[in-house]
Amino acid sequence: QVQLTESGGGLVQAGGSLRLSCAASGRTFTNYYMAWFRQAPGKEREFVAVISWSGGSTSYADSVKGRFTISRDNAKNTVYLQMNSLKPEDTAVYYCAVRRASKSSRPWYEYDYWGQGTQVTVSS
């Protein structure tokens, strides 16, 4: 079993920045993808960004491209999401997830493990 623990959420003004972290513990795997998703009240969980095991391949939702950066430190089993130029519409609970596969994917149901989420609130 893999446990994922997110941190770094909070309240920030529009235009500000936050850095989310997600630490993996327990059973770990090689060649797995890590991703960030978010879910706003009354909305479906949506893909934000994904990163390959090596960190050499990343992909972003159009809504965050150019503002968010995903990265990982495999020595620490941790993935990060640097969020800049935040907008009120970025307000959501942010979740990290692990996909044990050799190919990236965006649908949330194709991910195997999930963290408990961290709240990000952007005020206007």
Image (cartoon, rainbow, N blue to C red):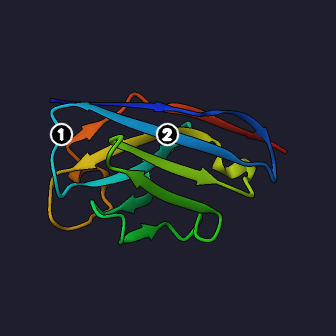
Q: Is residue 60 left or right of residue 89?
A: left
Measuring 30% from the left and 58% from the top, which residue is drawn there? 107
Q: In this view, does 46 lie to the left or right of 105?
A: right
Q: What element carries label 2?
A: strand
Q: Nearer the viewer, residue 15 or 90?
A: 15
Number of residues whose C-alpha sits closer than 10 Å to that of mark 2, classed few (under 14), some (14–19) or many (20 or more): many
Measuring 21% from the left and 55% from the top, which residue is drawn there? 32
State whether residue 62 is above or below residue 115: below
Instruction: Determine the CA span between mark 2 and mark 1.
Output: 17 Å
Circle 1 sits on which residue? 28
Number of residues whose C-alpha sits closer than 10 Å to that of mark 1, classed few (under 14), some (14–19) or many (20 or more): some
Q: Is residue 12 left or right of residue 44?
A: right
Q: Can residue 40 be seen in this view?
A: no
Q: Which of 42 and 13 is in front in this view?
A: 13
Whole-percent x, y for residue 124 in the image:
85, 45
Q: Which mark is residue 21?
A: 2
Q: What element carries label 1?
A: loop
Q: Nearer the viewer, residue 15 or 7?
A: 7
Along the polypeptide, which appears first: circle 2 or circle 1?
A: 2
Measuring 74% from the left and 53% from the top, which residue is drawn there? 87
